[in-house]
Image (cartoon, rainbow, N blue to C red):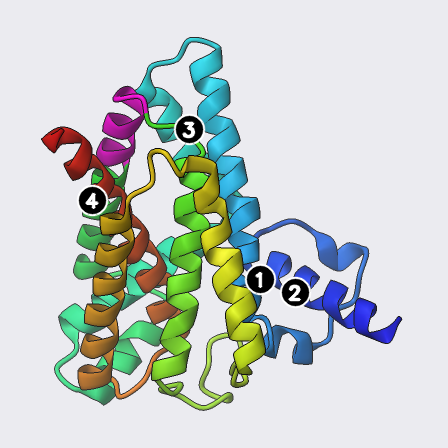
Amino acid sequence: MQGLQNTFKRVAAAVMFFTRLPLWRVVKVESRYFERVVPLWPLAGWLTGSVSALTCWAGLWVGLTASVATLLAILARTLLTGALHEDGLADFCDGMGGGTDRDSTLRIMKDSHIGTYGVLGLVFYELLLWQTLSALVGRGMSPLMLLAGDALAKWFASTMLYFLPYARNAAEAKNRLVYVRTPWSERLMSLLLGVAPMALVWREASVVGVVMAAAALWLMVTWMRRRLAGYTGDCCGATFLVVELVFYVTLLTERCMR
């Protein structure tokens, strides 16, 4: 019974962390559950990705164009997550673009004000994502790819914590949270949660897309290791969005080459 309760609270912690759903009103989740939430990131992607996919499908069903339907899907996820990932991307771009060394980069990332690099990063990301998804849906790709891509990218982003230490200490963290190391059994579970939704689009899925997403993760990890000697929460958000975008761009490139 205690094990079931612990599992429920960890799932609740993942949903509460990645969305604005007010679960805190019905369940109290202690901080120790948030510290162990990393393996369940892909499971949270099942929720946020499903919302995106259903929104896109509903838009197409009522007769909207692929461009409008995908834009609404992007908006739906952004509202659900409270722009959590986008905030991380903006801070990451500001820090990596404006910082000259480890200390200045971390200091800029922690600043709540958005700078030029952050604005440009968000503009280019949103435009690329929107145009890529519009083209994919317009070429007949199932909206379920939004679920598969979300879960897969969250799994890739979570693996970054296996290779890098946290760049700050708990007192300096924005949310006063440092994740604990994940045992191998839970890493395997996380992998299964991340790749399982790919079965929904297995006829359209791309091994090359997964490989390119892995390459994007490796480049991000290498960059952070050299600049920060670790990761931050902003790095996690930025890595998720970059890996997801690379996955979709690869899918589109393959479909255009057929």
State the residue position of label 2.
Answer: 13
Left or right, residue 150 beside residue 249: right
Q: CA distance from mark 4 to mark 2?
A: 32 Å
Q: Residues within 10 Å of mark 4 (few under 14, many from 20)?
A: many
Say what amino acid the circle numbered 1 marks.
Answer: Phe
Query: Which circle's residue, 4 or 2, is located before the other in the chain?
Result: 2
Q: Residue at x 19, y 83 (%)?
A: 227
Give the main secondary structure, helix, strand or loop, of the magenta stretch.
helix
Q: Which stretch is magenta? A: 130-140
The residue pinned by badge 3 equals 72
**Mark found first going from the N terminus, 2 or 3:** 2
Identify the residue at the far right of this view: 1
- Name the residue rendered at 80%, 61% in the picture: 27
**Relative to the observer, which residue lies in front, 177 or 135?**
135
Reading the image, the residue beneath label 4 is 250
Which kind of residue does numbered mark 2 sit on?
A: Ala
At mark 2, the secondary structure is helix
Residue beneath label 1, please? 17
Above or below 254: residue 140: above
